[in-house]
Amino acid sequence: MANMAQAIRMALHYAEENLGVTDIFGEDVGMPLGGVFTCTQGLKTTWNSPLDERGIIGAAMGIAMGGGRPVAEIQFCDYVYNTIDLLKLAGNTCWSSNGDWNLPMVVRTPVGSGIRGSIYHSHSFDATMTHIPGWKVVMPSTPLDAYGLLITACKEQNPVMFLEPKALLRVKGEERIPGEPDDDRALSKMIDAPLGDRSQWKPQWPTLQEYAVPFGKGKLVREGSQVTVVSYGRTLPLCAKAAAALADEGLSAEVIDLRSLWPYDWELIKQSVQKTGRVLYVNEDTEVTNFGEHLVRRTVEELFYSLLAPPRLLAGKFVPGIGLADSLEMASVPQQNDITAAIRSLAAEQP
Amino acid sequence: MSRPRLIKEASAPLQLEKELLLRIHDLMVKTRVLEERLIQMYKQGHGYFWIGGPGEEAFNVPLGLLMKKGQGPAYDYLHAHYRQSGTMLALGEEPIGALRQMKNTATDPYSGGRNFAGHFSLRKYNVAPVSSPIEVQYAIAPGTAMVQKRHGGDGITIVTGGDAGTAEGDFASCLVWSSRPANPLPILIIVTNNKWGISTSAEGQHGEQRISDRAKAFGIQAKTINGNDPIEAYTELKEAMEYVRKERKPYFIEALVSRLYGHSSASGANFVGDEVDCLKQFEARLAQDGLLTRQQMDDLRNRYTEDMAAAARQARDEPQPDPDSIWKHIYAEDK
């Protein structure tokens, strides 16, 4: 099966062939590199931009205003912070102009820890991005969802922030992308650029089909009855693994992949929490004014009388950065054992 | 700086030239009276804030007259700043729209009562929404120019801003992105230089002799012009636009202008006596050349003053936006 980087590439290929995507651009996005994570290799509308994040977001806004359909990349979300007021402007352009203008644009950026990226290649962006109204914000945890969410993003009339959990970009999926070949090695030969000279290389795209994951719809990853675990991105597979391990201990945890942060699937969370009475939210952004805190607040306000224990949030430590040393990274953001322990503890909590 | 060219221009077919001069004058008067009415509305409590462009009419009116007006990449895009009511009126906008925005009524055609005076948005003529952050328009403008370059035809992108904002990085971004050897862009980059950033003089902050020198460093053709002379402004803009339309390459204009009522209402919005008044200067020339009499010009001004007062009365009585409307237009599908 394709990994997430290949899935993103195939979705972009589908989008430039079928959905009117005109410009896939950013730093090192065009050939010969095709993106530092290879997500944009071999695509026909890619080009390399100057090393200027504000220029990239601004150009995407302008291209969208001019009737193009841009997919811009910020190489690491750690470098998106100097564009915050442009992101705010993109988010308020439709509202401020009382509906006169809208910006059909997608911004992709890799987020989170997991590659020992130290202080400026490990940050998360979901907490900050969900503070900016007017955008739709999504974050897949599987290649198929990456494919389907990106196709939906490229059909949107509004700005979409597509967050790519960099720890999962190289992880192969368990579900087939409609149209991808049966053999992984065959896919790699077709669409992965060779090492060395790439000047004559052209990808052979499989005949892909449209598969759109709607925004605002989460996914029930595992059914359970005692605890609800809601996560997205890098921590989602860790939650699923924890739930599988805990099942052997006789603990039944339900796992929800939110996938879409704004809008998000409150109905799915609500139904689950009303069933289990216990909920743990897991993500790796810093925990103060974290998106999970919003979900905890809403859970308390709307589901209080269904709860058997306080809702919990397991998130990144509120420290200025993720240190390079293995011990520092592991201590800063939720790991497998933290998640397992948090689910176990919540399941056992009694008044 | 080149000298006023009124006499030289008169060598063109007289009737046409006269018509154009009178049209420019008419729009300059209309713009000035509109701005003065906006200030008055603010001072009378019929608005929370005023910002605008009295002192930039001689430049902004010709700009609007020369724009290729329409929607989409075949036409000109304008990424404006908040001193360009003259350009909007020259594009054919009715002044009551600006008055409604001042009064933040539901009928405000540019923002529905959501944004400050002078923050225009007009998609039907490719006028991008004006926003308060200084200079973001310089980062956005290359995007529309890229689409236009690919589209073909002679549509261009025009971006304007003030001199103080050129200290922001987006101005440098615009110069870099417009002149990339991989894809030079059909963009006219404009700075109206009034030598002030709110209360701070450019003299203490900017070491460059001319802002246009910065464009030259990128191989962009650049000029500094007298933006207080509508004939020079018209002629230079026309030449610059023809170059950009045909060559599909960037061009840069620094227009020296006045700021006749200060930065905004935050600094009092009172008339500043020691700066060149482009309208007064132009009217003296028109009278000297015998194109208009003082009486005719006074009559024109009085007529606009009456019109504007009536329009302001009308705007004042219109309803505020509905509180529930805050949820409208967060996303485009709500249209």
Image (cartoon, coloured by chain):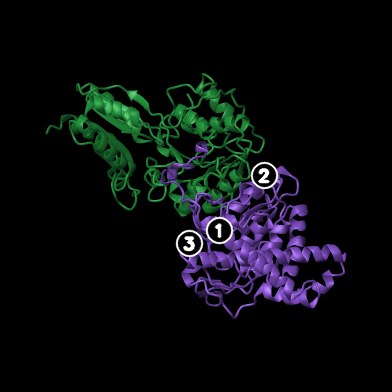
Measured as percent of width and height from the top left, residue B147 is found at 66, 45
Give B41 or A76, whichever is nearer the viewer.
Answer: B41
Which residue is label 2 attached to?
B72
Residue A290 falls in image quadrant: top left
Q: Secondary structure at mark 2?
A: loop
Chain letter belonging to callout 1: B
**Whether residue A136 can be seen here:** yes
Q: Residue at x 41, y 50 (%)?
A: A120
Colour purple maps to chain: B
Q: Nearer the viewer, mark 1 or mark 2?
A: 1
Which residue is label 1 attached to?
B99
Given the image, on which type of amino acid does mark 1 rest? Leu
Measured as percent of width and height from the top left, residue B108 is found at 54, 52
Report how far apart the C-alphas of labels 1 and 2 lie in the structure: 27 Å
Q: Residues within 10 Å of mark 3 (few under 14, many from 20)?
A: some
Sequence-wise, the earlier of marks 1 and 3 is 3
Colour green maps to chain: A
Q: Secondary structure at mark 3?
A: loop
Q: Is residue B95 rendered to the left or right of residue A274? A: right
